[in-house]
Amino acid sequence: MAKATTSIRRQLILMVAAVLIVINIIALWSAHIYANRAAKESYDRLLYGSALQMAENITILDSQVFIDLPVSAFETLALSASDRAFYAIMNGRYQVLTGYKDLPSIPFTQLLQQSSEKEKFIPIYYETMYHGEEVRFVALGKRLLEADSVNDVFIIVGQTSDARRAAATEVSQMALQFVALFFVITLLLLLFVIWRVLQPLQAIKQAITERSPQELSPLEANVPSEVAPLLKSINYFMAQLDNTLSRLQRFTAEAAHQIRTPLAGLNSQAQNAIDETDEALRQKQLQHILESSNVLTGTVNQLLSRATLTHRYQSHPFSPVSLDHVVKETCRELVVWALERQVEIEYLGDIQVTIKGDEFALKQMLQNIIENAIKYSPKGGVVEVELMVMNELADASIRLQIRDQGVGVPDKDKEHIFEYFYRSPDNFTSGSGIGLSIAKDVAEHHDARFHLKDNSPSGLIVEVSFPQQKGLLYES
Amino acid sequence: MKVSCRLGLCLILFSHIALAGPAQSGRSIIFPSLNKQPKLEEEVLTVYGAVNHRVISPLFKAYQEAYSNVAIHYTESNTRHLYEQFLSEPNNRPDVMLSPAMDLQFKLANDGYALAYDSPELGRVPKDSHWRSELFGFTYEPIVTAINTDILAREALPQSREQLLNLIRSKNHLLDEKIGLFDIQQSGLGYLAWAYDGQQSRSYGRLLEAFGTHQAQLYTDTASMLDGLLKGQIFIAYNLVGAYSYQWTQKYSWIKTIMPTDYTTIIMRTAFIPRDAQQPTLAKRFIDLLLSPEGQHILANQSALTPISAKVKGPFSRDELNKLPHGIFRPIPLGLELLIQTDDAKKRLIYSEWRDAIQPELKRKK
């Protein structure tokens, strides 16, 4: 069972949520800063406006400062309904002309400096504690001109910050509400988008789940280009599976047939032998039974060996195998059997070579090829087995050839010779027809190429080319 | 029963005094607790007010019915005296301050002398009737003019300030020394109403001139002014609190009360709990009662004060007030605008105009 890594959907959602949270926090923070600044500025303007209105109504007559504060100055302050306000009008000698007598931290130095510079007065803002509350003040100078004398008065107006804070909080809260709404909507939209984007994968899964196990036709689904390779791979895999399955089916059918026919023959031959009264004939029939039984044994053995090989492929990892040794050993084992059929086996080549592979499987392959060569060799024929290293092409390879001097295989049959139970129509030798297909399977399992060539003047060359394998030595 | 009898007795006793003389200095009245359970310890709620004790006593009674172990010490004096005493005697501050002088009360609250209290009753009264949960307006009272109709002869009752000026002009010397005014230098409420007139009306200057020419009499409290009106010492009393004047009108048919139809100033009596109150909890309960529908109902039915709540029914409710002939109601806003009324420079200006016109050294009547 493949272990699932973190789901794409979850990763996407987490990332999207994280990005959104970061963006929203930044937005909130900016809104908060903006709200504070906006509130401060607007309430500072009210304060300044109030001071200006007071200044407007301060006049001088006969060196006497005349103050008639307008209601509007206080109405301006009253716009922040829940704040206390304090004010004082002072002259240049620190005397309070009207208003609060004990306002703290009045920036006299700055005011007097502005006063002495004869420039336009600019408002000075400052914050200080008064009556136990933080109060924001504005101090503004006003120049009173009369004949040849100049008199400056200072207007100080202050207000507690409840309204500013409330205004800033209100804006911040509005921003919070907006951001929260934005967050939810964006998240929902993105969840929808993610769902939409990942839907093709879901569709593929659905399509596969809904299929019957036998259905292996390609999946038809409209998917985005990113998912198309996946679909292609799945379809390719299914085609392979289909192929394998149908081969297996054919194999099973053929194997059943191959076993049933000789068994039926054996059955009838045995029956005949029982009924036979002539001892000589009966002996001959029993001989036939034995031969048929041998053939059947061979077939069953090969089927079993194939099954074994199939099992080994899945369970045995490759290990270093001395190929020349295996070849020589196989030749030795078959030489007696060959001589019985008056066929010689000749081993050519003197190289030592080690490849990575499955020794048992390789031996099965060699056995099958050589047995086959012996079977089709004429009496007195020679089967040549040669192992060589080819350096002709850019990549060196190990090549194994088994050459016989039989009738050979016509080109039209070369394609079919590896099919299970295939036997050339004009072939009368006993055999199961599995041998070469097993050999080819083993070769392919070792990434080797399997070739059939014509020998001259007649006969078949079976050539197995192993690719070069790094880190393994071959010595000449 | 014994207790309420005693209460009734002292009410009668003091009501007489209250009407007889000016309330210059504070006068204390004790409302003993109704405590019948000796287990409960008696507590004292101290109230300073520029509200006639007869007017406020139904509220005290209701309070004591709810909290029977509480005795109420009520000190009554005029608005300016109340303010000055509050500032000059920091060790002798009450648990509740009641006054119609909105500007003085506001100044104290703005300067941080008031305790903030988020009364649950605040939701039931108009939004602009309280400030910062510190100062609570509890009445809605017109500033009126009272006229002794004897002066009118066959002429129509004046309805506006303009008509009042016409009347003064036509009666001319008949009205010399026969116009009654609050001494704005002595009465906080008088100053508030007069300064507010200065902001509102174009007739303000001509009124002042007319009052000066006819050597208006100056009073420091409503009761003595109404008494003067009744006795024929004056025929016109300008800028009175409606509640008292309407009571007089009910009693004496020849005294008429007018809400000027050009505009009618509305004042709120306000209450606050001083920050250094001895009994803040008792005081908070009193504020709750004052603003509650029950307290407002008492004002509209027993105290003859128009309550701030517009929903309450009764002979002195806002509904009834609206039915009387009146001009545009101009409530004095309970807010920072009131600071202008307490501004020294402004006060000096108004005082000097006033003195120039009325010359109090010669005309002032004690």
Image (spheres, coloured by chain):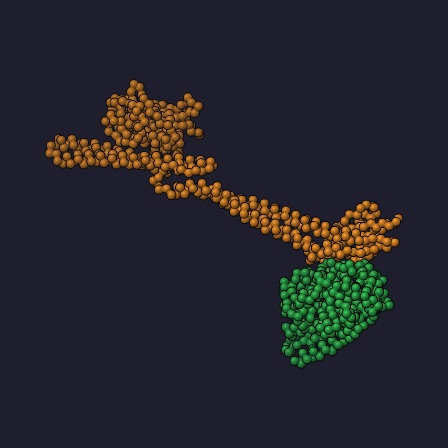
Chain colours: A orange, B green
Q: Is residue B333 left or right of residue A260?
A: right
> Which quarter of the figure is the C terminus of chain A placed in?
top left
Which residue of the protein is positioned furthest toward the front in this rendering? B154
Which residue: 78% across, 60% down?
B203
Which residue of the protein is positioned furthest toward the bottom in this rendering? B2
Up-down: is A139 above or below B163? above
Rendering quarter of residue A66: bottom right
Q: Residue B337: where, in percent of width, then height?
A: 73, 58
Rendering quarter of residue B135: bottom right
Decide which of B185, A386 is in the foreground and name it. Answer: B185
Q: Residue A164: where, in percent of width, then height?
A: 68, 53
Q: Is residue A261 left or right of residue A48?
A: left
Q: Can residue A234 be seen from the camera position used here?
A: yes
Which residue of the protein is positioned furthest toward the top in this rendering? A457
Q: Can residue A403 be seen from the camera position used here?
A: no
Q: Residue A277: where, in percent of width, then height?
A: 11, 34
Which residue of the protein is positioned furthest toward the right in this rendering? A148
Which residue: 27% across, 22% down?
A407
Q: Is residue B181 left or right of residue A255?
A: right
Up-down: is A203 above or below B36? above
Rendering quarter of residue A315: top left
> Which quarter of the figure is the N terminus of chain A placed in?
top left
Up-down: is B301 above or below A71? below
Q: Is residue B126 left or right of residue B357?
A: left
Q: Residue B36: where, in percent of width, then height?
A: 64, 78
Which residue: 72% across, 52% down?
A46
Q: How many marks?
A: 0
